Image (cartoon, rainbow, N blue to C red):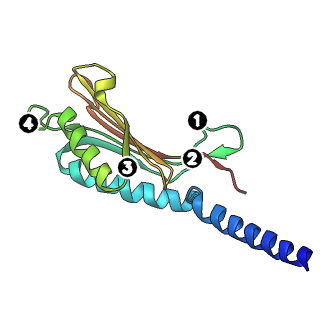
Amino acid sequence: MRFGANSRLAAAVLVCFAALTGCSGEPERPTLEEATRQLVTDGDALLSMVKTDLTGLTQERADQDRTTSCTPGEVQRYFVFKGNLADPARHDPISRIGLLKGKLETMGYREAVDELDLMEDELGVTVSLHEEAKLTFVLLGRLSQTPNLVIMGKTECYPRTG
């Protein structure tokens, strides 16, 4: 009888432990397709804030696999847009970076690096991370070089499929 009670207790402890570890860890990593969808949605939200003020706009909307910073056999996606603010005196690129950073914060990103870390007057940079979606956005504003506004978002590296 004693052995049966201990077995039931051990089984109950194991079930509780399994339930707790299944619920207490990090959120499940999104698939590359899910991360890409959110990357494009978030990138489009940023682009909509500045698009009408930009000239010479170039963009990449996460439509191709890249291996730039991944280990062999892995890929990631990028959302990049670059352009020049038509009137930098009126639309300061560095101030724009601050507004875009604020938008990212409302979408669940946290700042990892900002321009204060660089101590550069003519350059504004911030790096923001979305922990759950595993996305990174780098925002760059420059006063004296072109393009004077560069926004780059990327997914983490994922194993190549196919």
Mark 3 vs mark 1: in front = 3
Q: Of helix, strand and loop, which one carries label 2?
A: loop
Observer able to see residue 115:
yes
User: Marks 3/4: CA distance?
Assistant: 28 Å
Q: Position of residue 150 (x, y in %)?
A: 33, 37
Residue 47 in the image, given as x and y percentages of width and height: 29, 51
* C-beta proximity under 8 Å, tags 3 and 1: no
Residue drawn at 34 percent across, 56 percent down: 107
Which quarter of the figure is the C terminus placed in?
A: bottom right
Residue position for label 3: 109
Q: CA distance from mark 4 to mark 2?
A: 36 Å
At label 1, the amino acid type is Ser
- Find disc 1 in the rendering and name its residue: 69
What is the C-alpha distance between the residues marked 1 and 4? 36 Å
- Give SS at disc 3: loop
Which residue was labeled with disc 2?
Answer: 76
Cα distance between the residues tagged 3 and 1:
21 Å
Q: Of marks 4 and 2, which one's residue comes earlier in the chain?
A: 2
Q: Earlier in the sequence, mark 3 or mark 4?
A: 4
